[in-house]
Amino acid sequence: MSGQNFSKKRQMILDTIKSSHTHPSAKWVYDTLKEQVPDLSLGTVYRNINLFKEQGLVVAVANVDGEERIDGDTSAHAHFVCKECGKVFDIPEDIITIRSESCPMEGFSTESAVLTYFGKCNFCTHNANIKEA
Amino acid sequence: MSGQNFSKKRQMILDTIKSSHTHPSAKWVYDTLKEQVPDLSLGTVYRNINLFKEQGLVVAVANVDGEERIDGDTSAHAHFVCKECGKVFDIPEDIITIRSESCPMEGFSTESAVLTYFGKCNFCTHNANIKEA
DNA sequence: TCCAAAATAGTAATCATTATTGATTTAATT
DNA sequence: AATTAAATCAATAATGATTACTATTTTGGA
């Protein structure tokens, strides 16, 4: 009908990102979709993720072990990256928010802001305690 | 005298980082020092930067065009990354600060926090206006 | 159905970062 | 100054994420 629909694969890539709560890497999206779509190409995933980023449908939230991790939830919220297990956690906005959505420096125009904490998550902290006990 | 001094090259790498206000990449540090130290190796720069990060002497503040950018100023402050020219700017702490230094989620232990804005810097904004005029 | 443009698969290339290894430097001790 | 073990390094190769390329396929409209 209208010309603005995404191609089948493009839509599936976006859906996979939006429905995942894992803050996936391109590779994860590829591996996950590959089961349903055996002829999917990794390059296609990268190309579409870059497109989604330009269109603001997806944001890059962190770089973990050399892999970029993205989020299909573009609402303003912070993240926690566990250096132990590599998981990325959402930090609910009612717990912590970015103080200002735009940088107040004169003449600078802000498009996005990223607030990320690094450390050890509750699970990995707990595991470490067990090992030491 | 004491055993805790850095080797000559290690110290020079740290000095180059600390005295630069460019939020340099490993490659920039290498290219800059290479003039004074012709037998410097890029691997040595990477190895020492990783060491400095572990020791908390240096922090990774952003990934620009696939290159990690570091800061020798480890005091808590935010950064602005210009998507146009790739420069990384310090945002003075009296203008904006991270709301909370540690993530308040239960059981999570925070080691560091990074707040980064992305957009167009004043110089690039100005240049764009000139071109359009 | 037919066509032109957009999108894709598959593969090769790029490029930042890390690993390896043998030589050199350091630091502490005689 | 000489000795020696450990730390450090240069040079190079390897790794791995991302991008580029090209021939083929899909898409959406006439």
Image (tube, coloured by chain):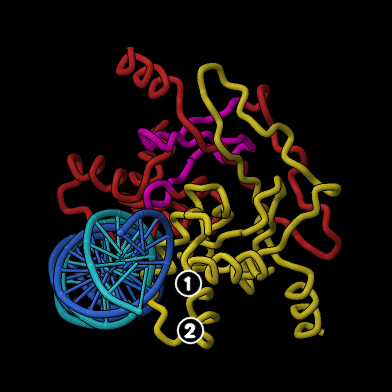
Chain colours: A red, B yellow, C blue, D cyan
Q: Are discs 1 and 2 both within one chain?
A: yes
| C-alpha span from label 1 to label 2 | 9 Å
Q: Which residues are magenta?
A: A64-92
At label 1, which amino acid type do we have?
Lys
* Viewer-nearest residue: B53 or A37: B53
* Viewer-nearest residue: A81 or A72: A81
- The chain containing the residue under callout 2 comes to B
Q: Which mark is residue B37?
A: 2
Residue C6 lies in quadrant: bottom left
User: The C terminus of chain B lies in which quarter of the figure?
Assistant: bottom right
Q: Where is residue B126 shown, x and y percent of the image? A: 80, 76
Q: Residues within 10 Å of mark 1 (few under 14, many from 20)?
A: some
Left or right: B67 in relation to A130: right
Residues marked 1 and 2 touching at CB (< 8 Å)? yes
Q: Is residue D30 above or below residue A111?
A: below
Left or right: A35 in relation to C25: left
